[in-house]
Image (cartoon, grey):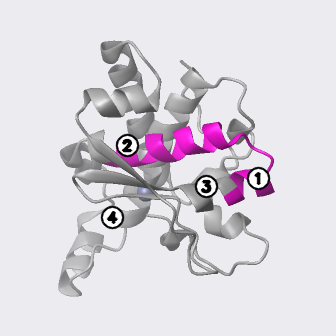
């Protein structure tokens, strides 16, 4: 499986790149072990519930999916609209979002934690009660996972050429000032 990092994926730091590769490696192992790269089948085999909701956002917030530690939610209307705008098959984007949320579920927390930046940064984060880099690292890992799944399941998908549609859906919206943070 090809686990290269798309050059257009908005990876800001070497740390995010490392997280992306962790996600991709996690996917490679899981796909081999489970014998499938279909994210719906993978999710079912891991006993993770998937709910589809028709919530279509608030106008500026682009949210395609979420994972709350128990259930993956897919926001069907937002996925459909974004896929249409970028001329990507809805099935591909839906699979990408599901795989991204599945990545949040299966990339091991201890491995994610081990690639956090230097301890001084963590101490500053602790001081203010936040972990300033945890979110981008977790997102990069989930995206690395998702694209490894997509490359296996849909090798020809246009999403591989335009990864930002999945990694930064808010930034690709022509009429939106939404930040990447809006995608969980
Ligand atoms: Zn996410």
Q: Secondary structure at mark 3?
A: helix
Q: Whole-percent x and y of residue 92?
A: 63, 37
Q: Residue at 38% across / 38% down in the picture?
A: 22
Q: CA distance from mark 2 to mark 3?
A: 18 Å
Q: Kindly identify which residue carries mark 2.
A: 103
Q: Nearer the viewer, residue 79 or 122?
A: 79
Mark number displayed over residue 134: 4
Q: Which residues are magenta?
A: 81-104
Q: Kindly identify which residue carries mark 3.
A: 79
**Disc 2 Cβ-to-ligand 1 distance below 8 Å:** yes
Q: Around disc 3, counting alpha carbons within 10 Å, would you say few (fewer than 14), some (14 to 19), or many (20 or more)? A: many
Of the two numbered discs 2 and 4 on the same chain, state the one appearing first in sequence: 2
Q: CA distance from mark 2 to mark 4?
A: 15 Å
In the image, residue 147 lies in the stretch drawn in magenta:
no
Q: Whole-percent x and y of residue 143?
A: 49, 46
Q: CA distance from mark 4 to mark 3?
A: 25 Å
Of the two numbered discs 3 and 1 on the same chain, state the one appearing first in sequence: 3
């Amino acid at each position: 499986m090809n686990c290269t990092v798309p050059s257009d994926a908005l990876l800001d730091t070497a740390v995010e790149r490392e997280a992306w590769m962790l996600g991709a490696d996690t996917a490679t192992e899981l796909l081999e072990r489970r014998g499938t790269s279909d994210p719906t089948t993978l999710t079912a085999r891991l006993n993770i519930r998937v709910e589809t909701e028709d919530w279509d956002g608030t106008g500026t917030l682009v949210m395609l999916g979420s994972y709350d530690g128990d259930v993956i939610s897919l926001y069907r209307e937002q996925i459909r609209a974004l896929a249409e705008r970028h001329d990507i098959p809805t099935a591909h984007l839906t699979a990408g979002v599901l795989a991204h949320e599945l990545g949040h579920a299966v990339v091991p927390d201890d491995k994610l934690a081990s690639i956090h930046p230097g301890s001084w940064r963590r101490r500053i984060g602790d001081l203010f009660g936040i972990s300033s880099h945890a979110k981008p690292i977790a997102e990069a890992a989930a995206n690395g996972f998702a694209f490894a799944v997509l490359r296996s399941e849909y090798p020809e998908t246009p999403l591989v050429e335009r990864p930002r549609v999945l990694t930064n859906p808010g930034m690709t919206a022509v009429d939106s000032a939404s930040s990447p943070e809006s995608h969980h």
